[in-house]
Structure formats: C-alpha cells, structure tokens
C-alpha cells in the first residue's frame, strides 16, 4: 500500500495484520502523537484492530467473488483515510444497518463518511478485506455461543450478514440471478438441525443454518463442492475434513470426506 513516497507490504499472519516494512510501529505511533507525520501502514494496523469485532464489516464488505462492491457514485470523492477510529458501541447495529444502502444485487458502494477508516480497510485489496470479514465473523460466532453474547439489534445484523452471503452462494450454485431467488432463512443455534429446502424451479428457498456456517463453510470457500451444497464442515479426529452436503433436489444428503496431507 502507499506509505509516504513508497509502497509498503501488509501481511495477515497468525491471525494478525502486520506491517512488514515497519520494525517498530509503537515508536511511530508515539512520533505521530507528538506531531510527527502519520504513517499509513501503522494507521492500517490501528484501523484493523479497531474494527476486528465491528459488525459493520459484515454488511459493508463484498459478499464474495460474485458480489463486487459497487462503484462510488461520486468519482471525485477522495478515498477514505485509514485513521484510527473507535469501534461502535453495543446496541448500535440496527442504526448502522438502516444507514447502509444496498444497490440491487450488490454490496454497498465504496463510499461513506469521509473520515471512516473502515472503508479504507475494505479497499486494501490483496485478500485482506476477506481476512477481515473472517476475523469479524469468527468473533461473533464465539459471542453467539455465550449467554447474552449478542443483543437483539446485533443478532438482526448478523442474520442479515448470513442471509446475504448464503444468497450469493446459492445463486452461484443454482446459476440463477440474485433477483430471481427468494430466501427464507432461520438463523438457528450452533447445535441446531441444519437444512435446505428448494421449491420446484428454485424460486423459493428455505434454509436453517447457524451463523457459524460463515466461518465453517463460506469463509473457507466450501459452499459448493462437486455440484453439492455444503451445510456444515468439521475436522475429524483423523485430520480429515467432513462436509455435510445436499443435492439441488434435496433428495440426497450425504457426508463428503476430504483427506488432507
């Protein structure tokens, strides 16, 4: 990414974002606080830390290769800076969701409040936005498994995130345009009975999946395998990956095992 007059490297490694060309980010933060020049790479690290549990990521980010972010309406608008920002407080999720405008069949455009560093994070490229989505999804998967881990507005936002990504995955599997699909999704508990039912013509789909499907399946790019749709994925004691899959007509539900290594 551009950093001053040079281009520097960012890498996601071990669950963290790292600035490879900065040996001592903390010292650079101190210099910036004392009135020095801000460092774009360190700003990116700080923005990542501030938004690693931000549920807005799951609404604003692309929902996959078949769902590119829309182009900005105002091409003259400057890119959002990656300045540090405070993560949203609990209970604000519905306000965020209601403020996001979704263009037909696509994710929100790459624009928003000019000082919002989240937009800059989603513009990084190199697969980093997808890593950020996976990081946020894993955080909220854990939260949902705790009593009182997510309040009603947050659950509504997470339901919307699951619905949108499931819909995109189903559209790719069925080779149908998004507007033609009607999806009724029940977001169940992690240990609930998962299911997928397609009406004739696949115009109406009913699904029961937990939010954990995002981290187990979607973020691993396992939603469609060998023409089958994956409802669940788990590691076996032998180190293989076991997938619970279903056919388009729903008549054949089978476990597919992938041996790794």
Image (cartoon, rainbow, N blue to C red):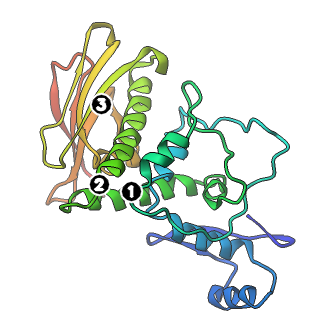
Residue 2 falls left or right of residue 254: right
Q: Which mark is residue 91?
A: 1
- Foreground of the two, 217 or 225: 217
> Which residue sits at x=59%, y=38%?
108
Task: Say which quarter of the image contains residue 105.
Answer: top right
- Foreground of the two, 116 or 205: 116
Question: In front of the other: label 3 or label 2?
Answer: 2
Specify which label sits upstream in the sequence, 3 or 1. 1
> Which residue sits at x=41%, y=32%?
169
Quadrant occupied by the N terminus: bottom right
Q: Percent x, y for residue 112?
A: 67, 48
> Which residue sits at x=66%, y=52%?
123
Q: Secondary structure at mark 3?
A: strand
For residue 68, above or below residue 152: above
- Real-space Cα separation, disc 3 to disc 1, in angstroms: 34 Å
- Foreground of the two, 56 or 123: 56
For residue 28, above or below residue 72: below
Q: Secondary structure at mark 1?
A: loop
Q: Secondary structure at mark 2?
A: loop
Specify which label sits upstream in the sequence, 2 or 1. 1
Residue identified by numbered label 2? 151
Q: Percent x, y for residue 41?
A: 69, 72
Q: Percent x, y for residue 114?
A: 72, 55
- Real-space Cα separation, disc 3 to disc 2, in angstroms: 30 Å
Q: Are marks 3 and 1 in contact (CB under 8 Å)?
A: no
Question: In front of the other: label 3 or label 1?
Answer: 1
Quadrant occupied by the C terminus: bottom left
> Which residue sits at x=43%, y=46%?
94
Residue identified by numbered label 3? 229
Specify which label sits upstream in the sequence, 3 or 2. 2
Q: Are marks 2 and 1 in contact (CB under 8 Å)?
A: yes
């Amino acid at each position: 990414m551009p950093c001053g007059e040079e281009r520097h490297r960012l890498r996601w490694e071990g669950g963290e974002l790292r600035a490879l060309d900065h040996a001592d980010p903390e010292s650079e933060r101190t210099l910036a606080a004392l009135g020095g020049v801000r460092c774009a790479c360190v700003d990116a690290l700080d923005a990542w830390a501030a938004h690693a549990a931000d549920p807005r990521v799951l609404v604003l980010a692309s929902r996959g290769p078949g769902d590119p972010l829309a182009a900005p309406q105002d091409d003259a608008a400057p890119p959002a800076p990656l300045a540090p920002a405070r993560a949203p407080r609990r209970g604000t999720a519905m306000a965020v969701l209601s403020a996001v405008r979704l263009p037909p069949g696509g994710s929100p455009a790459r624009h928003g409040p000019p000082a919002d560093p989240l937009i800059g994070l989603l513009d990084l490229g190199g697969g980093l936005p997808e890593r950020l989505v996976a990081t946020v999804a894993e955080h909220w998967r854990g939260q949902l498994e705790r009593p009182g881990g997510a309040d009603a507005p947050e659950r509504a936002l997470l339901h919307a995130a699951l619905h949108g990504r499931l819909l995109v995955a189903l559209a790719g599997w069925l080779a149908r345009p998004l507007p033609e699909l009607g999806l009724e999704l029940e977001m169940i508990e992690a240990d609930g009975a998962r299911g997928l039912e397609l009406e004739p013509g696949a115009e109406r789909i009913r699904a029961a999946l937990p939010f954990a499907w995002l981290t187990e399946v979607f973020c691993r790019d396992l939603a469609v395998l060998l023409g089958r749709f994956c409802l669940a994925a788990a590691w076996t004691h032998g180190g293989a990956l076991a997938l619970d899959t279903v056919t388009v007509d729903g008549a054949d539900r089978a476990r597919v095992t992938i041996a790794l290594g």
